[in-house]
Image (cartoon, rainbow, N blue to C red):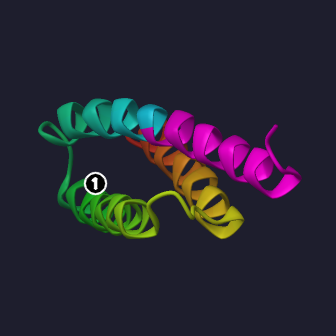
Amino acid sequence: MQTTNQHTADKIRDAIKGELDELQQLADEARLKINLGSKDAKDGWEDLELRLENLSSAIRREGKQLKQETLAAARSLRGDLRAFLTSYSG
């Protein structure tokens, strides 16, 4: 039987995996859009891409000990990526 802490950790890990999958999809869409975009769009994308790389690194470092803060960061980045895509959808 799983402990409450293990169950919570599993839920966080699953949620982060889902967020990361969606972030990768959004990032792929953004990469396609910025090829035709302005310099501002490209600069904005570089910031978001760096945040995505940092988040991915943090997830790898944390391994099975993923934190609630990491999930919050993933959700924040997802919102920012969606806003970026909306802003530069042309």
SS label for mark 1:
helix
The residue labelled by disc 1 is: 41
27 vs 35, nearest the viewer? 27
Q: Is residue 68 part of the magenta span, yes or no? A: no
Q: Position of residue 85 (x, y in %)?
A: 43, 38
Q: Looking at the image, which residue sits at the far right?
A: 4
Q: What residue type is labelled 1?
A: Ala
Which image quadrant is residue 88 in? top left
69 vs 2, nearest the viewer? 2
Q: Give the range drawn in magenta.
A: 1-20
Q: Is residue 89 visible?
A: no
Left or right position of 64 against 29: right
Q: Where is residue 59 in the image (x, y as percent from the top left)?
A: 43, 60
Q: Is residue 5 part of the magenta span, yes or no? A: yes
Which image quadrant is residue 28 in? top left
Main secondary structure found in the magenta portion: helix
Left or right position of 56 against 37: right
Screen quadrant of the N terminus: top right
Left or right position of 36 against 84: left
Q: Where is residue 29 in the image (x, y as percent from the top left)?
A: 30, 30
Please name the residue shown 60% across and 37% down the image: 14
Q: Can residue 18 be seen in this view?
A: yes
Q: Is residue 31 above or below residue 65?
A: above
7 vs 76, nearest the viewer? 7
52 vs 16, nearest the viewer? 16
Which image quadrant is residue 47 in? bottom left
Screen quadrant of the C terminus: top left
Left or right position of 7 against 74: right
Q: Is residue 59 above or below residue 2?
A: below
